Image (spheres, rainbow, N blue to C red):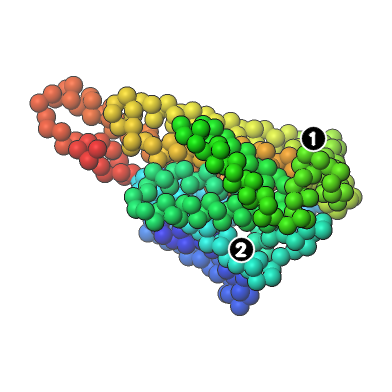
Amino acid sequence: MIWLIVGYMWLFLHRPFEIWPWMGTFRIERVSMIFILIAWLTVAEKQVVENKINAAVILFVLSMTLATLMSPYTTIFDSGSYQNWMKYLVFYLLVITCVKKESDLKIIITAFVVCFFVYMLHSYREYLCGRYVFVMGTKRLIGVDSTMNDPNGFGASMVICLPFLLPLVTLFKKRWHYFFMIGYILLSVRCIQLTGSRTAFLGLGVLLFSTATVSKHRMKLLPIMLLLAIGLWFTLTDNLRDRYRTIVDSSVNESANQSAQGRLHGFYMGWQNWERSPIWGVGPDCHGLATGEGFLSHCLYGQIPGELGILGMTAMAMLICCFLLNHFQILQHYKYLQRKGFGEEGLFCLRISTAIISAILLLLMFGAGGHNGYRFHWIWFAAFQALAASCLNEKINAIRKREVQNLLFPNQSNSIPLLAGNREGVSVNNF
């Protein structure tokens, strides 16, 4: 099942059926998911990962369902956002029931990064071949597909995926692995530049600066990053430089300034929608229909209140709190493993959770300038973190079981498995 899930991840991220229309006639994504579900129902060994974040995901789906059903502007058959979230929910269920070992989780995270790298590389190649959009006086890079190719959304996705290089470093053993990481970073930075997305550009700066600041090599990294930033700045065209200058000086580019004002307007109009329907909102992606302006909110903090109401706000707050609580628990478990001398065995899971928290904070930051409340990242990252927490729980339970065994049977040999259950059959001696 793990490789079927990986194959679907590639189809979802790269979306070749949107790049080559002849593939779209075969409904590859739908057919592949039906095949995976049949395999899941018939031959897959299923074991649900119990985690508090499951309740948050269910509550968010319920809030979207109720908002869609009660909306006068859409139905469950017409709402693209609602239907997409149902697809995300199916993927979530597949992951938390079929990923049974930490080695499988490593495959999932590696595949996520590699699939997105291929997507970026293909998009950059098409840009060099002349595929781009000209918006607000600037030539801007777009994704190679048609669903998630918006410059702002594409730029945000690239920044959000960067933290997932952190857990991969734990797996690196060969020199070419580090070359891949360097190439991934350089390609991401270049593509983010060319999207002309100010929020993505600002998010990249915040991410790189904060990473360098918390590193023990900060005194070396900060000057190097400063020099690289200066060099990269001069590789931009005049139009892109003018656009990015509007982050600190709105008078440089009037169209970019109007775009920023539109985000603020979307925030206020979102709360006006909330006043119309405070319990369940006006419905997913119905902001423009409810206001009569025809535009989306372009602001997370106006989108969720206006479109999902109090139920949606509660579900989103609960989801964010669960991310933070899971990370705190994972951090405590990692410290426990360190005290027992097995810190290295929990490092991968800790770094996954750290990457997810970084991505969630970026999503919240990008939410000031984008309606990203229905992105797939929320539910995918929930599944990844739940699995990481589960793997650490089993490591700790196995250690405690071993300690009890040693206490009751002090003369017994050290052949008792450290990790119990289905998730990882590794013994203490392997450590």
Furthest-bottom residue in view? 22
Between residues 303 and 429, which one lies in front from this camera angle? Answer: 429
Which quadrant of the rendered structure holds the C terminus?
A: top left
Near-viewer residue (147 or 259): 259
Among the 4 quarters of the image, the one containing residue 317: top right
Residue drawn at point x = 61 percent, y = 78 percent:
22
Residue plotted at (34% across, 53% down): 174
Left or right: where does residue 274 sit relative to residue 34? Answer: right
Against 404, residue 6 (above or below) is below
Q: Place residue 48 in its image quadrant.
A: top left
- Percent x, y of residue 424: 30, 44
Q: State the SS at label 2.
A: helix
316 left or right of 291? left
* Residue projecting furthest to the left: 411
Across and down, in percent, residue 340 comes to 29, 26
Q: Which residue matches tag 1?
A: 278
The answer for how far apart the CA atoms under marks 2 and 1 are is 43 Å
Kind of residue at disc 2:
Tyr
Camera-side mark, 2 or 1: 2
Residue under the image location 33 percent in, 44 percent down: 423
Residue 84 in view of the camera = no
**Residue count near mark 2 (Cα–Cα under 10 Å), binned few <14, some 14–19, many ≥20:** many
**x, y (%) of residue 137?**
82, 58
Most foreground residue, 409 or 10: 10
Q: Which mark is residue 124?
A: 2
Q: Is residue 408 left or right of residue 188?
A: left
Point out the tag, 2 or 1, that comes first from the N-terminus: 2
Kind of residue indicated by mark 1: Pro
- Vertical relation: 381 (above or below) 35: above
Q: Secondary structure at mark 1?
A: loop
User: Outermost residue toward the top?
Assistant: 407
